Amino acid sequence: MEAFSDGVIAVIITIMVLELKTPHAATWQALLANTPAFLSYVLSFVYVGLYWNNHHHLLHAAERVDGRVLWANLFFLFWLSLFPFVTSWVNEAEPMPASIPTAMYGVVLLMAAVAWMPLSYTLMRCNGGNNGVLGRALGGQRGDWKAKLSLAIYAAGIALALLAPIFSCILYALVAVLWIVPDRRIEYQLKQHP
Protein backbone atom coordinates (compact mmCIF):
# COMPACT_ATOMS: atom_id res chain seq x y z
CA MET A 1 0.00 0.00 0.00
CA GLU A 2 2.83 2.39 0.83
CA ALA A 3 4.58 1.77 -2.50
CA PHE A 4 1.34 2.25 -4.43
CA SER A 5 0.56 5.46 -2.54
CA ASP A 6 4.08 6.79 -3.06
CA GLY A 7 3.74 6.08 -6.79
CA VAL A 8 0.39 7.88 -7.01
CA ILE A 9 1.77 10.87 -5.13
CA ALA A 10 4.84 10.98 -7.41
CA VAL A 11 2.56 11.00 -10.46
CA ILE A 12 0.46 13.80 -8.93
CA ILE A 13 3.54 15.97 -8.45
CA THR A 14 4.77 15.17 -11.97
CA ILE A 15 1.45 16.12 -13.53
CA MET A 16 1.39 19.39 -11.57
CA VAL A 17 4.85 20.43 -12.76
CA LEU A 18 4.01 19.50 -16.35
CA GLU A 19 1.03 21.88 -16.17
CA LEU A 20 3.37 24.84 -15.58
CA LYS A 21 3.65 26.83 -18.79
CA THR A 22 7.04 28.04 -19.94
CA PRO A 23 7.35 31.71 -20.87
CA HIS A 24 7.13 32.42 -24.60
CA ALA A 25 9.78 35.12 -24.45
CA ALA A 26 13.31 35.04 -23.06
CA THR A 27 12.77 37.99 -20.73
CA TRP A 28 12.44 38.53 -16.99
CA GLN A 29 9.06 40.12 -17.59
CA ALA A 30 7.78 36.96 -19.28
CA LEU A 31 9.08 34.87 -16.40
CA LEU A 32 7.57 37.19 -13.77
CA ALA A 33 4.22 37.06 -15.57
CA ASN A 34 4.07 33.38 -14.52
CA THR A 35 4.55 34.20 -10.82
CA PRO A 36 0.91 33.60 -9.78
CA ALA A 37 0.86 30.21 -11.54
CA PHE A 38 4.17 29.28 -9.99
CA LEU A 39 2.96 30.27 -6.51
CA SER A 40 -0.16 28.11 -6.85
CA TYR A 41 2.08 25.23 -7.97
CA VAL A 42 4.31 25.77 -4.91
CA LEU A 43 1.28 25.76 -2.62
CA SER A 44 -0.06 22.55 -4.17
CA PHE A 45 3.39 20.95 -4.04
CA VAL A 46 3.70 21.84 -0.35
CA TYR A 47 0.28 20.34 0.37
CA VAL A 48 1.08 17.11 -1.47
CA GLY A 49 4.44 17.00 0.32
CA LEU A 50 2.80 17.50 3.71
CA TYR A 51 0.33 14.71 3.04
CA TRP A 52 3.09 12.42 1.76
CA ASN A 53 5.17 13.08 4.88
CA ASN A 54 2.25 12.43 7.23
CA HIS A 55 1.15 9.39 5.20
CA HIS A 56 4.66 7.97 5.54
CA HIS A 57 4.57 8.40 9.33
CA LEU A 58 1.09 6.93 9.57
CA LEU A 59 2.07 3.81 7.62
CA HIS A 60 5.38 3.51 9.44
CA ALA A 61 3.44 3.01 12.67
CA ALA A 62 1.15 0.38 11.12
CA GLU A 63 2.00 -3.29 10.96
CA ARG A 64 -0.99 -4.45 8.93
CA VAL A 65 -3.77 -3.25 6.66
CA ASP A 66 -7.16 -4.67 5.77
CA GLY A 67 -9.73 -4.01 3.07
CA ARG A 68 -11.21 -1.02 4.89
CA VAL A 69 -7.77 0.58 5.10
CA LEU A 70 -7.21 0.01 1.39
CA TRP A 71 -10.53 1.65 0.51
CA ALA A 72 -9.92 4.55 2.90
CA ASN A 73 -6.50 5.03 1.32
CA LEU A 74 -8.02 5.06 -2.17
CA PHE A 75 -10.59 7.63 -1.03
CA PHE A 76 -7.76 9.80 0.29
CA LEU A 77 -5.67 9.37 -2.89
CA PHE A 78 -8.70 10.25 -5.01
CA TRP A 79 -8.86 13.71 -3.46
CA LEU A 80 -5.10 14.16 -3.74
CA SER A 81 -5.29 13.18 -7.41
CA LEU A 82 -7.50 16.23 -8.04
CA PHE A 83 -4.73 18.65 -7.00
CA PRO A 84 -3.30 18.92 -10.54
CA PHE A 85 -6.76 19.62 -11.97
CA VAL A 86 -7.74 22.37 -9.55
CA THR A 87 -4.24 23.88 -9.58
CA SER A 88 -4.34 24.07 -13.37
CA TRP A 89 -7.86 25.52 -13.30
CA VAL A 90 -6.85 28.23 -10.84
CA ASN A 91 -3.84 29.03 -13.06
CA GLU A 92 -5.77 29.25 -16.33
CA ALA A 93 -9.03 30.94 -15.33
CA GLU A 94 -9.35 34.68 -15.73
CA PRO A 95 -9.17 36.82 -13.73
CA MET A 96 -6.56 35.08 -11.64
CA PRO A 97 -7.57 33.96 -9.07
CA ALA A 98 -11.15 33.45 -10.22
CA SER A 99 -13.93 32.74 -7.75
CA ILE A 100 -15.21 29.30 -8.78
CA PRO A 101 -11.80 27.68 -9.42
CA THR A 102 -10.50 29.08 -6.11
CA ALA A 103 -13.56 27.74 -4.28
CA MET A 104 -13.10 24.33 -5.92
CA TYR A 105 -9.43 24.36 -4.93
CA GLY A 106 -10.65 24.83 -1.36
CA VAL A 107 -13.18 22.01 -1.74
CA VAL A 108 -10.38 19.65 -2.79
CA LEU A 109 -8.25 20.80 0.15
CA LEU A 110 -11.18 20.31 2.50
CA MET A 111 -12.05 16.87 1.14
CA ALA A 112 -8.43 15.69 1.28
CA ALA A 113 -8.40 16.69 4.96
CA VAL A 114 -11.74 14.96 5.54
CA ALA A 115 -10.51 11.82 3.71
CA TRP A 116 -7.49 11.70 6.02
CA MET A 117 -9.81 10.98 8.96
CA PRO A 118 -11.16 7.56 7.87
CA LEU A 119 -7.67 6.55 6.73
CA SER A 120 -6.24 7.33 10.18
CA TYR A 121 -9.17 5.71 11.94
CA THR A 122 -9.17 2.46 9.91
CA LEU A 123 -5.40 2.10 10.27
CA MET A 124 -5.70 2.64 14.00
CA ARG A 125 -8.52 0.06 14.29
CA CYS A 126 -6.56 -2.46 12.22
CA ASN A 127 -3.43 -2.02 14.38
CA GLY A 128 -4.52 -2.56 17.96
CA GLY A 129 -7.23 0.08 18.30
CA ASN A 130 -6.76 2.54 21.14
CA ASN A 131 -4.03 0.40 22.72
CA GLY A 132 -1.83 0.22 19.60
CA VAL A 133 0.90 2.67 18.63
CA LEU A 134 -1.46 4.63 16.38
CA GLY A 135 -4.25 4.54 18.95
CA ARG A 136 -1.99 5.96 21.64
CA ALA A 137 -0.61 8.57 19.24
CA LEU A 138 -3.90 9.65 17.69
CA GLY A 139 -6.28 8.97 20.55
CA GLY A 140 -5.33 11.99 22.63
CA GLN A 141 -6.53 15.51 22.05
CA ARG A 142 -3.03 16.92 21.45
CA GLY A 143 -2.64 17.88 17.82
CA ASP A 144 -6.36 17.67 17.00
CA TRP A 145 -6.70 21.44 17.26
CA LYS A 146 -4.74 21.83 14.00
CA ALA A 147 -7.09 19.47 12.15
CA LYS A 148 -10.20 21.23 13.44
CA LEU A 149 -8.79 24.68 12.75
CA SER A 150 -7.76 23.60 9.23
CA LEU A 151 -11.28 22.42 8.39
CA ALA A 152 -12.72 25.72 9.63
CA ILE A 153 -10.21 27.77 7.61
CA TYR A 154 -10.90 25.71 4.45
CA ALA A 155 -14.64 26.28 4.88
CA ALA A 156 -14.06 30.02 5.36
CA GLY A 157 -11.80 30.09 2.30
CA ILE A 158 -14.42 28.36 0.15
CA ALA A 159 -17.09 30.86 1.21
CA LEU A 160 -14.73 33.81 0.82
CA ALA A 161 -13.70 32.69 -2.68
CA LEU A 162 -17.02 33.90 -4.02
CA LEU A 163 -16.29 37.44 -2.78
CA ALA A 164 -12.51 37.84 -2.65
CA PRO A 165 -10.63 34.81 -4.01
CA ILE A 166 -7.18 36.26 -3.25
CA PHE A 167 -8.02 36.14 0.47
CA SER A 168 -9.06 32.51 0.07
CA CYS A 169 -5.63 31.76 -1.37
CA ILE A 170 -4.04 33.44 1.65
CA LEU A 171 -6.16 31.31 3.99
CA TYR A 172 -5.20 28.13 2.11
CA ALA A 173 -1.53 29.09 2.40
CA LEU A 174 -2.02 29.78 6.11
CA VAL A 175 -3.17 26.19 6.67
CA ALA A 176 -0.10 24.88 4.85
CA VAL A 177 2.13 26.99 7.10
CA LEU A 178 0.26 25.62 10.10
CA TRP A 179 1.19 22.07 9.07
CA ILE A 180 4.83 22.78 8.20
CA VAL A 181 5.57 22.05 11.84
CA PRO A 182 4.65 18.35 11.84
CA ASP A 183 2.58 16.54 14.42
CA ARG A 184 5.15 14.48 16.34
CA ARG A 185 2.68 12.23 18.17
CA ILE A 186 3.41 9.15 16.03
CA GLU A 187 7.20 9.57 16.23
CA TYR A 188 6.92 9.99 19.99
CA GLN A 189 4.91 6.77 20.37
CA LEU A 190 7.31 4.83 18.13
CA LYS A 191 10.23 5.93 20.32
CA GLN A 192 8.35 4.98 23.49
CA HIS A 193 7.24 1.57 22.20
CA PRO A 194 9.65 0.40 19.48
Image: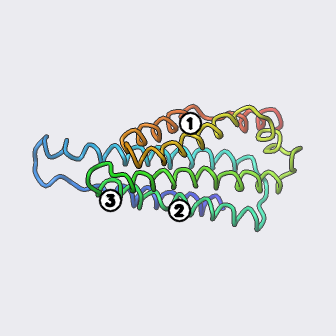
Q: Quadrant of the C terminus?
A: top right
Name the residue beneath numbered marker 3: 19
Q: Which mark is residue 8?
A: 2
Amino acid type, mark 1: Trp
Which x, y percent locates residue 95?
A: 26, 51
> CA–CA distance between discs 1 and 3?
25 Å
Which x, y percent locates residue 166?
A: 36, 41
Which is more foreground, mark 2 or mark 3? 3
Which is more foreground, mark 1 or mark 2? 1
Circle nearer the N terminus (1, 2) = 2
The residue lying at 13 percent from left, 40 percent from top is 28
Q: Which mark is residue 179?
A: 1
Is 61 placed left or right of 112 in the picture?
Answer: right
Is 1 placed left or right of 176 in the picture?
Answer: right
Circle nearer the N terminus (2, 3) = 2
Amino acid type, mark 2: Val
**Above or below, comparing residue 5 to residue 39 in the picture:** below
Instruction: Please name whichever residue, 38 or 146, is drawn nearer the observer in this view of the structure.
Output: 146
Which x, y percent locates residue 192?
A: 81, 32
Instruction: Please name whichever residue, 35 or 110, is drawn nearer the observer in this view of the structure.
Output: 110
Look at the numbered disc 2 and give the secondary structure of its residue: helix
Amino acid type, mark 3: Glu
Figure quadrant of residue 84: bottom left
The residue lying at 10 percent from left, 44 percent from top is 27
Is 172 placed left or right of 1 in the picture?
Answer: left
Task: State if disc 2 and disc 1 touch (CB < 8 Å).
Answer: no
Look at the numbered disc 3 and give the secondary structure of its residue: loop
Q: Residues within 10 Å of mark 3 (few under 14, many from 20)?
A: some
Circle nearer the N terminus (1, 3) = 3
